[in-house]
Structures are given as structure tokens and as C-alpha cells.
């Protein structure tokens, strides 16, 4: 059988960023390339001419389907292939060279969400060149299959890669406004499930979650039997979560997980909500169920958040087991997850948290063993990922591979790591691309020098109130702070300063930081970082009680955790009870039950577990747990 002739039909506008990549990926797979430009003002048409002379112009009408159908009239091939400029054929291109015999083909589209995360869905992107097959829909247009239900479909192996969902691309204000205008008009003309769903997505992108929820519900009521119904339910859960209506979101997720039992995405989303609520054991149960379902069953789903049934679930389990002092299980899930997704650089943070004391050649050997450096791009990714964590191992990696092409900001921070404070100051003074993420770097270099001149030099780059700014200046130059309301942002920066100082082994600076303030929440953050790096005795000396119940809840929880790891169970029980009396939530109750089991006070443990059964939202872990069978799982692993 002869190879089918394929016509690539594209509509474009100002796509010089990515058009060449798209056309390079497909030029050997298609018999002709048809480009319809809708008003480009950049080099788009010039780039297109390098691949085809079949370039046409279309006066934009705010209707994508009309533009698509205009392109189809010029196609002479047996089949039409639809690609957007920010897409390319990324896997199994050879399947497009095989003879085609079905009327239309679903193609998997892999949407790059950044940092190794991706979402996949299936869409009709390859179909016979038949006048009966035309596009409908002013926005998110699709081939109209309602009128041709007798045609034969199939799924092709080729996978389209798409990076248009990256945050900086999606949140382009001009495109958001344009799309909202189009979809509002489309909903008015055709108030169907698909258009309501698209309207909900637009509201969600604009963080209008009440409106998004309202139209998502309409979309589901009208289209619950359609292939994209599970995706609507996922967006309903997301909207409810954004509105802090977690109980409702959990109910939707649990019901959806029963209806769509092989969709791991629902279990994963429920797990994320439980994690956010602090129901760690319920979250662990959900992520383990994701692994039981398996990735193979999810790849064939209409829509799937890639990795929820494999490496993403492993990553979450590693984080949760680490948080709950089960380093053995955390290591196991980390190794399994990173093996399945070596490009997911989020695993680097888990690695550095699991092994906080590994450094030098040992650190480099471990990193390279897990993430083999087989190209310059991988090395650059690792350097940037480690720098984003401000991990000193960045210097070890740079030195080992003799990396010279560093940004000024990374070079300035590396100078701080080396202890060259003069060069670090000089470089930061030259820096021009200063962003919020660099505040911690400038704070560190000024704190080391006891001089806020670098921060002052870049004052305009940061949106910090004058009162807070004076507070930071006093910390840097006088090693003392005034009594003001400590905002969440100030707490985060304080904690990062403490972490950076400990990582650099500048303990004389840590002592100065400790002595600069007796504010309980700041002392708590110092103690938390000391505990993280194994300095448990010092952490106990640093922490002080607060007169605020919510702060004491955190403080008592940390002290309890440290005392458990030191083997002082009686004092641990005392602080666990104090925390539970302040806030009868899942984690406080869970930890108290665990300590009571270790103390062999089983009746008390059962009584606390009974109290926890009244929690709202309810905890399935609490309801289903048998204390007698749980004894071995309550054992505490010493903190390293």
C-alpha cells in the first residue's frame, strides 16, 4: 500500500519564536505545507518561505475555525495534519509515514507545563481531506464530528509536543483579553458544554474562581457523557480548592475517583488537597493508590496529568515520608521516581533534603550518578536547579566541570560561597536584572559584611514597605531588630537567610542572627533549620514560647518532633498534648496517637483516635485505622 499524502495546514501570527522548530519537525513527513498568516508583523512569513511557497493571507475575523477552514481549501493531500506554531512532532514521527486508512485520527498532545511537568490529552489532528470534515468553534476550534458519526476513527502513535501552556505564554494579557472576548461571544451564540468549559478555563486563568466554578458546573451538567467530562471535574476541584472549599473539592474528587476508577489524576488531586489540609496519612494513601493504578492505564485516557500514576506520586510520597521522619521510605520513593523521570528537576530538592550533609566530590558523584551529564544542556539545567536552592554543591559541580558561562548573578553568589565577599559585593553592584528572588542573595552578602549598601543600591527593585526596609537594615548593620508585625514575606526571607548561613557553615553569623531577636516565630524558624540539618540540641535551646496560640502550635510541634527523635518520649508526649489542646487537627492528633502507642498507652491512643473521627473534612485514614494493627508502623526512625 502506498504512503498517504499529508497536507500540513497551519494558521500563524507573530510566531518567529517557534515556527522553525515546528516546520523542521514535520517537513520530511508531509507532502506539502500550507501556511495561512493572519497579520504577522515579525519574521513569521519570512521563516515560512524557507519551507513553502504556499503562503496565504487571511483577514482575521476573531474566529479560529474560519481561519482553519480557509487553509483547508488549498490542501491537495489525502489527509490534513493540523499543527500550531508552538507545537512540533516530538515522538514516533515514523507513524505518519505509514499508510493511513481511517477517516480521522486522534493524536496525543503533550503540553509542557515547565520544570519537567506535563499534561497530555487526545485530539483529532489528522483527518481525511474531505469537505464533510470542517472546523467549528471560534476559540479552541475542533473538527465537527457530530454530523459524520459513521466515519472510522483511530489513535496514531505520533505525539505532538506543545509549550504554549508555559505560564509566561499563557498569561499574555493581550491574548487573555482576546480569548475572553471570543469565547464570551461564542457562548452567547452557542451555549453548549464545550463552550462553557472553555469559558471556565478563561476565568480560571484570570483567577476568577467563583465565575469559573459556576460555568464549569454548567458545562458538566450538559456534557457529563462527553470524553472531556473528567477534565471538567478536575477543573471543578481546582476551583473549589482555590476558594478554600476543600470539603466540597474532596467530595467531588472521591466521587470522580469511583466513576473513573482508572484515572489516577483524581486520586492525585485528592492527595494534594489532603496534603494541603495536613492530613498526611490520607495523602499518602491517595498517592499509593495512584501507583496501584499505574501510568499505562492513564496514557490512553483522553486527558492525563503526566506522572500522577508514577513519578509525581513517588515524589509526593518521598516528601511526605521525609516530613514524617521515615527516611527509609522517602529514599525508596525518591529513587523510584527519579529513575522514571530523570528530567524532572523537582527531584533535586528532594535529593538535597534527603542528604543535607553530602558535599564536595561525594556530592558531585551522587548527582551525576542520578542525573548523568550527557550534554551541555543537562549541566546547565543542574547548575540552575542547584542555584535556585542556593545549594553550595553548585560550586562543586561548576568546579568539577570547569563551567565558565555563568550569569552575573550566579557568579556573584558563587563568590559568596567561596568566601570572597569583596568580589561578591562588586558583582552585585554591577547587576542590572535584579528580581524578587535575589533579595535573599543581597541580604546574605550584606549580613556577612554588616553593611546594607548592596541592598540600598537595588532598593527600587523590591516592593518592600519603608518600615520593613528599615527593619532589614537594622538587622544587617546593628544585628538587632525593632518590634514590628512580622509578615509572611519577612518570615520567608529570615528563614532563607538562616538556611544559607547554615549551608555555608558560617556559625558565627548564625549566633549573631539568633541573638538579634527574641521574637518567637523568628526563633522557631531558626530552630526549624537547625533541626533540618541535624542540630537538634541547639534547636531546643533556640526556640522560645509565644503568646500567640497559632505560633505555639508550630513551636510545640517542632519541640515534640525533636524530643521524639532524641528518645525523650515523656517530654515529647507533654508537648504533643499541649499542641493538641491548642488545635485538635489531624497532624497533632496523629502524632499524639503515635507517641501514646510507643509509650504502650493503647487506651489513650484509641480515645484520641476516636476524637479524630469527628474531624471535618473527615479522614478516611482515621476511620479505617485499627490501632492494634498499626503498632509496627508507629515506630519512629531517628532523624539524621
Image (tube, grey):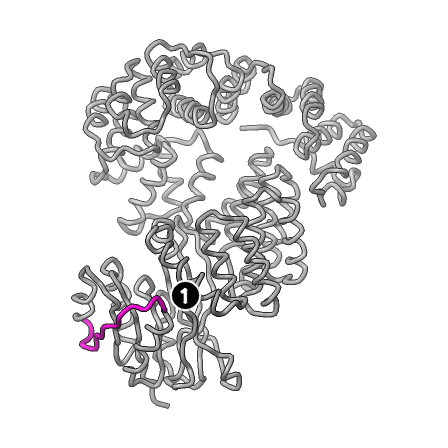
The residue at 21%/77% (across/down) is 54
The number of discs equals: 1
Residue found farthest to the right: 603
The residue at 45%/31% (across/down) is 356
Measuring from the top left, give residue 410's x and y in whole percent.
Answer: 27, 34
In the image, 386 versus 367, the foreground residue is 386
Q: Main secondary structure of the magenta part?
A: loop
Residue 125, compared with residue 380, is above or below; it is: below
Residue 588, compared with residue 287, is above or below; it is: above
Quickly name the residue at label 1: 139
Q: Quadrant of the N terminus?
A: bottom left
Residue found farthest to the bottom: 1
Measuring from the top left, give residue 274's x and y in whole percent.
Answer: 62, 43
Measuring from the top left, give residue 481's x and y in whole percent.
Answer: 42, 12
The residue at 25%/29% (across/down) is 412
Image quadrant where residue 389 sits: top left
| Secondary structure state at the residue bearing disc 1 | loop
In the image, 404 versus 65, the foreground residue is 65
The residue at 29%/68% (across/down) is 60
Image quadrant where residue 616 sits: top right
Residue 183, compared with residue 567, is above or below; it is: below
Residue 60 belongs to the span the image colors magenta: yes
Measuring from the top left, give residue 607's x and y in whole percent.
Answer: 81, 31
Circle 1 packing at 10 Å, graded few (<14), some (14-19), many (20+), is many
Give the left or right position of residue 239, taking residue 453 as reference.
right
In the image, 103 versus 411, the foreground residue is 103
Give the left or right position of residue 589, taking residue 144 as reference.
right
Residue 122 belongs to the span the image colors magenta: no
The span picked out in magenta is 51-63
Amino acid at each position: 500500500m502506498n504512503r498517504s499524502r499529508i497536507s500540513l495546514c497551519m494558521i500563524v501570527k507573530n510566531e518567529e519564536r517557534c515556527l522553525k522548530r515546528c516546520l523542521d519537525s514535520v517537513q520530511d513527513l508531509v507532502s506539502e505545507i500550507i501556511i495561512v498568516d493572519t497579520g504577522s508583523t515579525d519574521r513569521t512569513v519570512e521563516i515560512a518561505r524557507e519551507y513553502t511557497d504556499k503562503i496565504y493571507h487571511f483577514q482575521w475575523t476573531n474566529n479560529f475555525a474560519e481561519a482553519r477552514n480557509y487553509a483547508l481549501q488549498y490542501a491537495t493531500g489525502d489527509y490534513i495534519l493540523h499543527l500550531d506554531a508552538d507545537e512540533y512532532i516530538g515522538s514516533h514521527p515514523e507513524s505518519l509515514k505509514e499508510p493511513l486508512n481511517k477517516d480521522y485520527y486522534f493524536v496525543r498532545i503533550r503540553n509542557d507545563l515547565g520544570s519537567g511537568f506535563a499534561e497530555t490529552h487526545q485530539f483529532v489532528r489528522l483527518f481525511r481531506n474531505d469537505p464533510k470534515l470542517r472546523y467549528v468553534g471560534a476559540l479552541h476550534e475542533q473538527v465537527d464530528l457530530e454530523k459524520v458519526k459513521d466515519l472510522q476513527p483511530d489513535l496514531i502513535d505520533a505525539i505532538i509536543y506543545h509549550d504554549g501552556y508555559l505560564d509566561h505564554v499563557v498569561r499574555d494579557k493581550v491574548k487573555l483579553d482576546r480569548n475572553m472576548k471570543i469565547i464570551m461571544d461564542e457562548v452567547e451564540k452557542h451555549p453548549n458544554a464545550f463552550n462553557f468549559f472553555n469559558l471556565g478555563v478563561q476565568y480560571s486563568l484570570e483567577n476568577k474562581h467563583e465565575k469559573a466554578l459556576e460555568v464549569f458546573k454548567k458545562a458538566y451538567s450538559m456534557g457529563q457523557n462527553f470524553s472531556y467530562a473528567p477534565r471538567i471535574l478536575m477543573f471543578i476541584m481546582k476551583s473549589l480548592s482555590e476558594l478554600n472549599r476543600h470539603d466540597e473539592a474532596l467530595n467531588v474528587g472521591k466521587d470522580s475517583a469511583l466513576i473513573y476508577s482508572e484515572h489516577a489524576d483524581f486520586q492525585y488531586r485528592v492527595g494534594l488537597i489532603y496534603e494541603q489540609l495536613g492530613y498526611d496519612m490520607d495523602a499518602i494513601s491517595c498517592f499509593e493508590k495512584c501507583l496501584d493504578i499505574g501510568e499505562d492505564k492513564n496514557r490512553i485516557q483522553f486527558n492525563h496529568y503526566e506522572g500522577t500514576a508514577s513519578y509525581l506520586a513517588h515524589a509526593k510520597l518521598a516528601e511526605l515520608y521525609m516530613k514524617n521522619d521515615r527516611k527509609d521510605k522517602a529514599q525508596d520513593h525518591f529513587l523510584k521516581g527519579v529513575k522514571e523521570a530523570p528530567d524532572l528537576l523537582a527531584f533535586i530538592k528532594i535529593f538535597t533534603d534527603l542528604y543535607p550533609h553530602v558535599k564536595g566530590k561525594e556530592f558531585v558523584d551522587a548527582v551525576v550518578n542520578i542525573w548523568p551529564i550527557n550534554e551541555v544542556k543537562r549541566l546547565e539545567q543542574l547548575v540552575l536547579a542547584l542555584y535556585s536552592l542556593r545549594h553550595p554543591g553548585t560550586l562543586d559541580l561548576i568546579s568539577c566541570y570547569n563551567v565558565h558561562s555563568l550569569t552575573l548573578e550566579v557568579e556573584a553568589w558563587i563568590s559568596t560561597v567561596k568566601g570572597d565577599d569583596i568580589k561578591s559585593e562588586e558583582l552585585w553592584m554591577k547587576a542590572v536584572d535584579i528580581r524578587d528572588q535575589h533579595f535573599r542573595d543581597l541580604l546574605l552578602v550584606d549580613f556577612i559584611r554588616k553593611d546594607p549598601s548592596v541592598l540600598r543600591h537595588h532598593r527600587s527593585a523590591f516592593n518592600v514597605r519603608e518600615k520593613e526596609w528599615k527593619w532589614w537594615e537594622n538587622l544587617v548593620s546593628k544585628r538587632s531588630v525593632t518590634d514590628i508585625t512580622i509578615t509572611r514575606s519577612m518570615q520567608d526571607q529570615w528563614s532563607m537567610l538562616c538556611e544559607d548561613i547554615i549551608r555555608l557553615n558560617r556559625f558565627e553569623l548564625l549566633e549573631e542572627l539568633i541573638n538579634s531577636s527574641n521574637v518567637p516565630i523568628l526563633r522557631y524558624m531558626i530552630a526549624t533549620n537547625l533541626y533540618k540539618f541535624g542540630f537538634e540540641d541547639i534547636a531546643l535551646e533556640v526556640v522560645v514560647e509565644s503568646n500567640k496560640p497559632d505560633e505555639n502550635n508550630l513551636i510545640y510541634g517542632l519541640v515534640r518532633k525533636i524530643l521524639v527523635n532524641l528518645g525523650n518520649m515523656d517530654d515529647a508526649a507533654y508537648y504533643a498534648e499541649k499542641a493538641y489542646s491548642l488545635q485538635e487537627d489531624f497532624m497533632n492528633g496523629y502524632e499524639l496517637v503515635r507517641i501514646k502507642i510507643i509509650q504502650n498507652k493503647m487506651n489513650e491512643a484509641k480515645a484520641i483516635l476516636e476524637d479524630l473521627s469527628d474531624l471535618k473534612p473527615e479522614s478516611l485514614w482515621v476511620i479505617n485505622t485499627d490501632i492494634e494493627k498499626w503498632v509496627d508502623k508507629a515506630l519512629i526512625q531517628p532523624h539524621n
